[in-house]
Amino acid sequence: MNKALITVVTLIVVIGILYYAYTTLMPNYSATSSSPLPQTASVPPESPSPESSQYASPSATASPSADMNPSAQSTNITISNFSFNPATLTIPAGTEVTFTNNDSVTHTVTGTNLDSGDIAPGDSYKHVFTDPGTYGYNCSIHPNMKGTIIIQ
Ligand SMILES: [Cu+2]
């Protein structure tokens, strides 16, 4: 009765030792060869080939930081999916609006007394709206992109 238990435990221990010895002594050994592993470390022939491994992506341009001006109001319009969001914005006079281009193509913000020039992907354009009124604008590259600023 106890003999059977001892046999089972011994088997488990032996198997464990063999498994440990196998995984420890042959960490990088391929199972195809039956010759004993030499002590000298074999360098795996996996050195990277010099075929176009380095691709330098253009670094993101840092947007200019605006000075803190607690008395002035500011808000944001994002450009994404070829549209201005929000398309219609009502602001008090003197508000600085930051247009941020989140698309992967260049856009502009173009209207009356308003010309951002090209806004590259990831860049932004700031403009302070001072004269009350309703002003439409669009993207000069994609004229179907339209927005409205209402200055009160
Ligand atoms: Cu556009």
Image (cartoon, grey):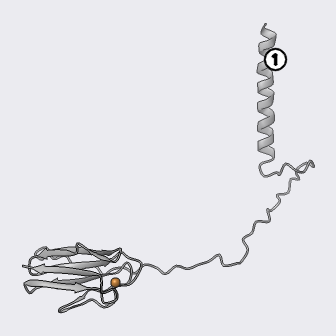
- Residue 3 in the image: state x and y as whole percent: 81, 11
The reply to whether residue 101 is in sight is yes
Q: Quadrant of ligand 1?
A: bottom left
The reply to whether residue 73 is in sight is no
In the rendered image, the residue lying farthest to the front is 144
Measured along the vertical axis of the image, is residue 131 above or below residue 72? below
Q: Is residue 123 left or right of residue 17?
A: left
Indicate the quadrant where residue 87 lies: bottom left
Q: Secondary structure at mark 1?
A: helix
- Residue 51 in the image: state x and y as whole percent: 70, 78
- Residue 86 in the image: state x and y as whole percent: 23, 72
Quickly name the residue at label 1: 7
Name the residue located 46 percent from the left edge and 79 percent from the top edge: 59
Which amino acid lies under the numbered mark 1 shown in the image of this protein? Thr
Name the residue located 78 percent from the left edge and 19 percent from the top edge: 8
Quadrant in which the N terminus appears:
top right
Name the residue located 79 percent from the left edge and 15 percent from the top edge: 6
Indicate the quadrant where residue 112 lies: bottom left
Quadrant in which the C terminus appears:
bottom left
